[in-house]
Structures are given as C-alpha cells and as structure tokens.
Image (tube, grey):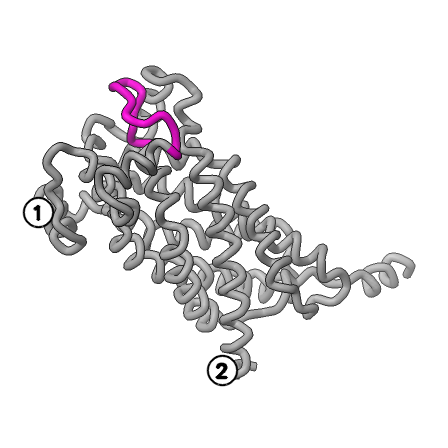
Amino acid sequence: MPRQVMAASAPQRTGGKKTHPGKAILAGGIAGGIEICITFPTEYVKTQLQLDERSSKPMYKGPIHCAKHTVQNHGVRGLYRGLSPLLYGSVPKSAVRFGANEFLKTQWRTRHDGSLSKTGSLFCGLGAGVSEAILAVTPMETVKVKFINDQTSAKPKYRGFLHGVKEIVKQQGIRGTYQGLTATIMKQGSNQAIRFFVMDSLREWYRGNDPNKNINPLITAAFGGFAGACSVFGNTPLDVIKTRMQGLEASKYKNTWHCATQIMKNEGPRAFYKGTVPRLSRVCLDVAIVFVIYDEVLKVLNKVWKTE
C-alpha cells in the first residue's frame, strides 16, 4: 500500500507537452531555414579546417586565419559558398528531425501508459537522427562539402547548386550524393540522441511537477546551447570522419573504418578534433536558435491549428 501511495503522488514523466507530428514538421522546417542563414559562416570555416589535412601542407593556422583568408580572396560572399545546398536541405532536415522525434515519442508513450522515460527520450532522439541522416542530411552534406572543397582548388568546376549536383551525379551517379552514409548515420544518430535527451532532461527539471509550465525563450536558448555543446564533445571525431568521406578526395578511402584508421595513422588522434572550436560555436548557436524558434512557432501553430 505505501508503494502505491508513493507511485500515485510521484509526477509522471511525459517528456513535456505532447505535440502533433504535423506541427513538429512545419515548425522544425521553419526553424531550420532561419537558423542556417544565421550560422553558415562558422560551418564553412569548420569544414575548411577539417579538409585542410595535416598530411599535406596546412593552408590555415586556425579559424580566424581561415575566415580572414577567405574574405581576402573571395570577399564576404566567400563565407557563404555552399550555402544553397545546405539551405535547401536544412528545411527538410529539421522537419524530419522534429517530426520523427515527436512521432516516436507518441509511439513510446502509447506503449508505456503515457510516460516517456529517460531511455525513451534517448532512443527517440536516436531515431530522429537516423531518420534525418538517411532522408536529408547525407545528400545535403555531401554536396555542401564538395562545394566548399571545390572552392579551394585552383580551378573551381561548380558554377552553382544545380550545376554542381548535375556534375556530381553525372560523374559518380546517385551514390555520389550518399558518400559517408554510415558515418553520417552514426554522427546524426548520436547528435540527436544527446541533444533531445539533454533538452528533455533540462526541461523536466525546470518544470518540476508542472509539465505544462511555459519556459522563457532565454532559458530555452541556454538549455539548447548546453545540449549542443554536449553533442560536440561527444561526437566531433565522427564529424571529422564524415567530412573526409564526403570531400573531393573521398575516393582514397575504402570505407568509414579505413578513413578513421588513415587519419589516426597519418595525422594522429588530435586530428579527430580538428574544427572543434568553430563547430562548438556554430552548434551551440545552432541548437539554441532552432529550439527557441521551434518553440515560438509551435505557440503560434497551437493557436491556429487545433489538434486536440
């Protein structure tokens, strides 16, 4: 009897407010599009540093030097080279991510009497990451990396997004846009597992016994930035491997494991954390912005789109 009383008084962990997957898809897409336009320059610098392999003569001394060198040679617009494929992909990527996460949360709650455990939060985030990796991230990231890598060559061959995609498919087939799929699944899966788990845990802690308590956007931004930092330190090595597997010299690697062993052999363990500083700044800002915009768009959608 005492156990039953304690169980009844303990608040049920639901993972916060329930959101219709359709709303999550729409809000996620809008948030993703706005976020990438704000943070792309740091993504550009991060990718350049990761492609600047130590086995050859390094071109950049660090993120600031990379940005300065790019502006001097290509102007400010040079920091946005490769934005178009990422922008075209960011909307469906975020839509799939948030939609899949809410769909999986709904399925988990249905099977567990309306509750969402920490394990459930982790697995739902993992599922969201794998979904976005297959449906949006891999082709988007492959094209983006090739675009950025192409700019460093003596004679750039891609004139724009459509021309670049056409050339990649012409020379390498559809598989050319799916290079590094395994590494991307590993990266995105771990990314979203960590981020959604941390966000769900922090929101639950902040709301206490009231799962419907509103959270100030500044608090959401702080939680999002912390969740982003956790994911960076947790999986930057996978991000480096993924970038190498999707670059213009990806053909020299047999598979994901071969790429990892070659990096270790030729450049040492520190190479797995190349680009950490610019990635940390971008990801923290990225995750903070996305979650804030997502929550704010949801508030609007909840007023005009009644689903309950």
Q: Amino acid at mark 1?
A: Lys
Residue 165 placement (x, y as % from top left): 16, 51
Mark number, residue 50: none
Residue at image position (25%, 19%) is 56
Residue at the extreme front of the image, as rendered: 72
**SS class, disc 1:** helix
Residue at the extreme right of the image, as rendered: 2
Residue at image position (24%, 28%) is 254
Callouts 2 and 1 close, C-beta under 8 Å: no
Question: Relative to residue 146, is residue 6 depicted above or below?
Answer: below
Residue on which the image places disc 1: 170
Mark number, residue 305: 2
Q: Main secondary structure of the magenta part?
A: loop
Q: Quadrant of the N terminus?
A: bottom right
Left or right: where 289 falls relative to 253 = right
Residue 127 placement (x, y as % from top left): 46, 52
Q: Could you tell me if residue 48 is visible in this image?
A: yes
Left or right: where 119 falls relative to 77 = right
- Is 209 or 8 nearer to us in this picture? 209
Q: Is residue 100 magenta?
A: no
For the image, the number of numbered tags is 2
Residues in magenta, as a range: 50-64
Neighbor class of circle 1 (other Cα within 10 Å; few <14, some 14-19, many 20+) is few
Residue at image position (39%, 17%) is 268
